[in-house]
Image (cartoon, grey):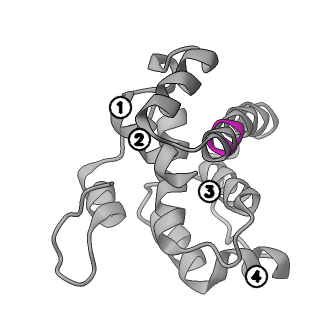
Amino acid sequence: MFDVLVYLYETYYRPDACPEPAALVKKLTAIGFEDEEITRALGWLTDLEEANHEFADQYPQQTAFSFGIRIYAQQEMDVLGTEAVGFIQFLESAKMLNAVQREIVIERALAVGDAPVSLEKLKVIVLMVLWSQGKEPDGLMFDELFLDEDDAEPRLLH
């Protein structure tokens, strides 16, 4: 699923630039992605779009007035893991994510079904949340999302 998401991010500069679902499925299949992987990725993106609308409608003022600390439920900690929670807190404290975006990232990470969600997958989730909202990550965020810890060289997405 994550390979499909990364491909979509790299190929289409924004979600509305993607072809219609039927054409997109054909294109992804022709490239060599498995049907199950395509279905999961497109379903995840559909749910991401719904989450964007739901959170924006329910919490429009949240981004301007959020100064509190997010306390994670045990279920969230079990799925996210300490490394992912720390990374989310870093992005929020650096003003790379606002409170609503943080909640969408958490919701989408929980929907993946992996426990704990690897840091690499979380980074793709963050990138896809921003992409789905038409936000371009700044240079610092890009470095943080795609810097290889071993050799401090930017790595290719796939």
Q: Given the image, on which type of amino acid does mark 2 rest?
A: Tyr
Viewer-nearest of discs 3 and 1: 1
Viewer-nearest of discs 2 and 3: 2
* Crowdedness near tag 1: few (<14), some (14–19) or many (≥20) residues, C-alpha within 10 Å: few
Question: Image point 54% across, 68% down: which residue?
Answer: 88
Query: Does 130 appear in magenta?
Result: no
The answer to the question of whether label 1 and label 2 lie on touching residues, with beta carbons closer than 8 A, is yes
Looking at this view, is 71 or 117 the one in front? 117
Q: Position of residue 123 (x, y in %)?
A: 47, 61
Q: Which residues are magenta?
A: 40-44
- Please tell me whether the stretch drawn in magenta is mainly helix, strand or loop: helix
Write down the quadrant of residue 50 in the picture: top right
User: Which label is found at residue 78?
Assistant: 4
Q: Given the image, on which type of amino acid does mark 3 rest?
A: Arg
Left or right: where 140 falls relative to 132: left
Question: Image point 70% across, 33% down: which residue?
Answer: 46
Label 2 and label 3: CA atoms lie apart by 23 Å
Viewer-nearest of discs 2 and 4: 2
Residue 23 visible in the snapshot: yes
Left or right: where 154 falls relative to 34: left
Q: Given the image, on which type of amino acid does mark 4 rest?
A: Asp
Question: Image point 48% across, 21% down: which residue?
Answer: 18
Check disc 1 and report the residue beneath it.
11
Secondary structure found at label 2: helix
Looking at this view, is 59 or 46 the one in front? 46
Check disc 3 and report the residue beneath it.
102
Q: Given the image, on which type of amino acid does mark 1 rest?
A: Thr
| Marks 2 and 3, the one that precedes in the sequence | 2
Check disc 2 and report the residue beneath it.
7
Q: Does residue 58 sit above or below 66 in this rendering?
A: above
Secondary structure found at label 4: helix
